[in-house]
Amino acid sequence: MVVFPVVKLATLALRTACKPIANRLKKEAGYHLKFRNFIISIAQANHRLTTRVQRRIYGHATDVAIHPLNEEKAVQAAADLLGELFVFSVAGAAIIFEVQRSSRSEARKEELRRQEIQEIKTKNEELAREIELLAQKLEELEQLSRGRGLLGTLNFRHTRVSEDRKSN
């Protein structure tokens, strides 16, 4: 199947291309003021969340005030988060696409198997009817042979002709 290698190569190319795209997004994130403020707020929220989780894991108090990141660290953390999110999103989309493609392929194979099984069942039913018909014919022949004897069943023509000559 030619589609399979093309899809795999396209997925690999997309994954390879998405890393530079993620780096470009990181770079651009620092230049636009509204976007910069948005990602700083995301980075601060992420920092608070990870700090609380780490404190709970290590058994420290969680009600302590968490110092916010400075602006440059927040931009860098948010840009890294954005880049990783982009890379993982592309990888996840590629995995979902591959699973769906594989699922469709399996469904086609299953449908072919069902058709083959149905054809076998139909052929089996036809053969069963044929066997039943032959069994009926055999039964008829057996009944005829019981009634007439072997020569009556075979019904040879020359036997009748010779019998007719004798009777004349």
Image (cartoon, grey):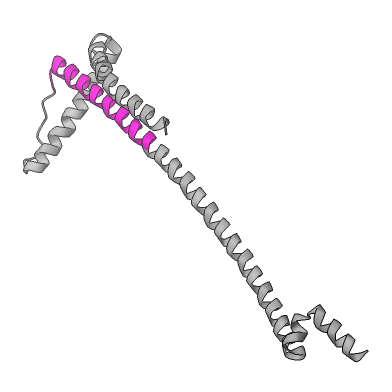
Query: Where is residue 97 drawn, in percent x and y?
Result: 39, 34
Q: In front here: 54 or 147?
A: 147
The residue that appears at 65% across and 68% down in the rendered structure is 130
- Point 32% across, 23% down: residue: 14
Residue 162: percent from the left, percent from the top?
A: 84, 84
State whether residue 156 is above or below residue 42. Answer: below
- Residue 139, compared with residue 66, is above or below; it is below
All told, the count of numbered labels is: 0
Q: Main secondary structure of the magenta part?
A: helix
Side of 114 relative to 128 (left or right)? left
The residue closer to the viewer here, 91 or 158, is 158
Residue 88 occupies quadrant: top left
Is 21 in front, or is 130?
Answer: 130
Give left or right: position of 146 versus 105: right
Residue 153 vertical position relative to residue 1 in the rendered view, above or below: below
Residue sitting at 28 percent across and 16 percent down?
A: 21
Question: What residue sits 86% from the left and 82% below the top?
Answer: 161
Which corner quadrant holds the N terminus? top left
Q: Is residue 138 left or right of residue 1?
A: right
Image quarter where the C terminus lies is bottom right
Residue 31 is covered by the magenta coloring: no
Q: Nearer the viewer, residue 27 or 114?
A: 114
Residue 129 image position (x, y, % from top left): 65, 69
Displayed quadrant of residue 18: top left
Magenta part of the chain: 69-98
The stretch drawn in magenta includes residue 95: yes
Residue 20 x %, y %: 25, 16
Q: Is residue 137 left or right of residue 14?
A: right
Residue 50 to residue 74: above or below: below
